[in-house]
Image (tube, rainbow, N blue to C red):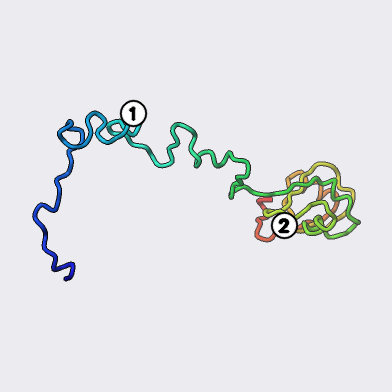
Amino acid sequence: MELNNLIKLRGYKKPAKRVGRGGGSGKGWHTSGRGQKGQKARVGYNIPIGFEGGQVPLHKRFPILTRFKSKRGKQIFTINLSVLNRFDEGQEVSPQTLVEKRLLRKLPRNGVKILGSGELKKKLTLKGFLLSASAKEKLEKSGSTFAPREGDNVQDL
């Protein structure tokens, strides 16, 4: 005997129960198999995916939760120009040397930006920094030289 040789038996398929048509239908009286009260017992109920009964759903709360970090957020560390006075005259300064001198704990993903707060009293060679307009002006005034980061446009700095 194989599945394709089976014959259909007469009366094998029962007729579907007509829900909500009184006691004679064989399925419930007033509740019609929907249980007691509530949103799911109502006619035409539709609960969207992620609905949490009026509470703010998880996918909307997620950015507010404490450990959430935006993938778009840039990690640019800023230092003031006066901090660079700790280096010796004529020394080459890069973000890596700041980590070695323990002015930074680790190298930031998107670089280090020098702000124009304070005065620079020494001539230094700066490489791989982002500069604010006032810091750039003060660096030129002190006679220091600077090279932009690789891949940065000089106009953007």
Which percent across, then down, holds residue 21? 17, 32
Numbered tag placed on residue 148 in the rendering: 2
Q: Which residue is mark 1?
A: 37
Amino acid on which the number 2 mark rests in the picture: Pro
Indicate which disc residue 124 carries.
none
Residue 7 x/y as whole percent: 11, 63
Q: Is residue 34 above or below residue 7?
A: above
Seen at 21% across and 36% down, the residue is 27
Which comes sooner in the sequence, label 1 or label 2? 1
Name the side, left or right, on which 151 lies relative to 59: right
41 or 139: which is nearer to us?
Answer: 41
Q: Is residue 11 above or below residue 1?
A: above
The answer to which image quadrant residue 129 occupies is bottom right
Count up the numbered dots: 2
> Mark 1 falls on what kind of element?
loop
Q: Which residue shows up at 83% across the image and 60% down it? A: 92
